[in-house]
Structure formats: C-alpha cells, structure tokens
Image (cartoon, rainbow, N blue to C red):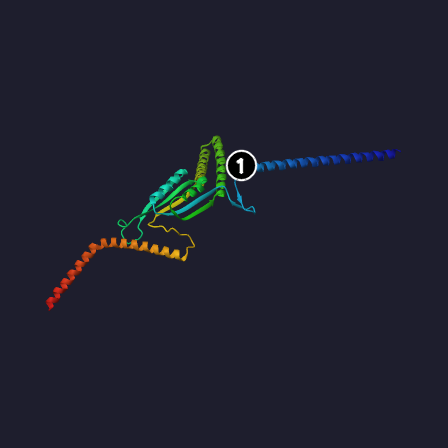
Amino acid sequence: MMIKKGWALLLFLVLVLTGCGSGNNDLSDSTESDSGAGYMDERATEDMAVEEEMGEVDFTDGQGSQLIGDKVIRRVQLEYETLDFQETTTYVLDTVSDYDGYIEYSNESSYSPSGIAPRDQSRQYRRVNYLFRIPTDALNDFLDDLDGMDAYKLSENIGVEDVTQTYRDTQSRIQVLENKEERLNELLEQAETVEDILQIENSLSETIAEREALQSRLDTFDDLIDYTEVHLSVTERPRIANTREDGLSFLARIREAFVDSFYAFYYFIQDAFIWFIYAIPFILILALLIGIGFYILKKVSKKRK
C-alpha cells in the first residue's frame, strides 16, 4: 500500500514538472515573439524616418532601376535667324526679364554676307551670343514664349546632367567634417600644453578650409540646379527661306535654289563694285605705268630706226 502511494506521488510530481516546463516554454516563446515584433516595428519606423529625412525623388523605369535623381543640372542651346535683329533681341531680353532670369554673358559682333569687300564698306549684319540664367521651374514656359517670336529657330538642344550622387556624397563629407570640427573645438578647450594647442589648431584650420571648399561646391551645384543655363544666339540675315523643313518637293527645292542664287549674285555684284571703287587708285597707277612703258618703247623704237 505504501509502495502504491509512493508511485502515485512520483507520478504526480512528474506531471506537475512537465506542466511547468511547458508553461515556461510557452511564456518564453511568447516573450521572444513579442520582442521580435517590437524590434521589427522599431526598424520599420526608423527606415521610414530615414526615407522621409532624405527626401529623394527617384524616377524609375518599369523594372525598378533608377533613371535620374532630384539634383539635375539642365543646359539649353538655342540658335535663331531673323530679319529684324533689334526686334528679336528686344523680345528675347524682355522674355528673360519676365521670368526673373538674368544675363551672365553676351557678345555682339557683325559680319558681311561675303568676304570680297572690306568690312566697313560692305552691308553689315549682326549676330549676338547670350548666356542666360533662367529659373528651372519656369524653363518650359520660357521656351514656349520664345517660340512665339518672329524668328526662325535653327536648332534647340537640351542636355541633362544628374549630380545627385555627387551632391549627396559632398553633403555627407561636410557632415563628417562638421563633427570633426566640433570634436577638435572640445579638445582645444581641454588642451593644456602649447604643443597640443598648436597641433589641434592646425588640424582645425585644415578641417574648416576643407569644409568651406565643399560647401562652396554645394552652393555652385545649387545655383546650377535652380537656374538653368540657356545659350542663345541670334543671327541677322538678309533673307530667310520660308520653308526649310525636310521633305521639300523637287519644284520647291528648285525655287529655293534659284532665289538663293539670285541673292548670292546680287550681293556678289555689290561687293565686286565696292572692291572696284577701292581698286581705282591702283588701276590708275598701273595704267599710268603701262602708258609710260609704251611711251618709252615707242621712243626707243624710233631712235633705232
């Protein structure tokens, strides 16, 4: 009877210990699960905060590969021909002013349709080259307004340079240098010997100089990004063909060639006539020398006879 009670007590203890072990395991699993979920939630929150802080705008294709970042430098090249040089250039400058742009560079020169006559006597035509800075946000509207002026657009080229990666790397480097500068200032306050002070000050000066150079580079990037470079040239012409598009008919090409040849011959005659006027003194001197030569030869021939 005592043996049976002992076996029953042993069995009871085994069941109790098994139940406690299972309960502890369940509690441990639940704790680990809750801890893992909390850690994942914390990491997700941190990732979202980092993405919001970066604020980058990525343009991607259908496969998810990055095409272009948010730090982009645009450059535009435009070339126009016009019959009324003054009216066209005035329109261009007024349009630039309307969009709060400014002139960074301009160069005006003159030329003649042919090189036969001297420049100061031939009919002179003008050309001008501009470098404008136009706010990037207003660039498309600015180009649309230029299409409305009375001039023929020979070409339009738009280039894009993505400097996002370089910009971000420079920002990161500036942040590192700022942290280094802060630590050096702390060490400078704690320095006791003259040697330590001089060494820290030299390192601090180099750090400040490098940071300012990188900051200047960022400022240049910001200016190029916010204000697009627009290279624009206007050339005055004596004549502009009304149809220069591709696909001209054979008769239209003959008509254009005939008109162009007429204008070329017309200006050739003008330049040749002006050249002749310049050459009159030389022609008279040459004629006089030839006359004297004939006179001398005639006298010599008479003496021989």
| Identity of the residue drawn at 77% across and 35% down | 19
Q: Nearer the viewer, residue 39 or 139?
A: 139
Quarter the C terminus occupies? bottom left
Residue that label 1 marks: 53
Number of marks in picture: 1
- Give the percent coordinates (x, y) of residue 291: 16, 60
Query: Residue 230's image quarter?
Result: top left
Task: Give the vertical position of 201 relative to 113 (above or below).
Answer: above
Asked if one can make out residue 53 in the rendered structure from this viewpoint, the answer is: yes
Residue at image point 76% right, 34% down: 20
How far across and how far down the image is residue 2, in percent? Answer: 88, 33
Outermost residue on the right side: it is 1
Q: Residue at x 13, y 67 (%)?
A: 301
Which quadrant of the structure image shows residue 290? bottom left
Q: Residue at x 69, y 35 (%)?
A: 30
In this view, the residue in front, 137 or 267, is 267
The amino acid at mark 1 is: Glu
In this view, 246 is above or below 16: below
Relative to 220, say whether 255 is above or below.
below
Q: Position of residue 168 (x, y in %)?
A: 50, 41
Residue 1: image x %, image y %? 89, 33
Which residue is more in the foreground, 114 or 56?
114
Image-based side of 140 in relation to 13, left or right: left
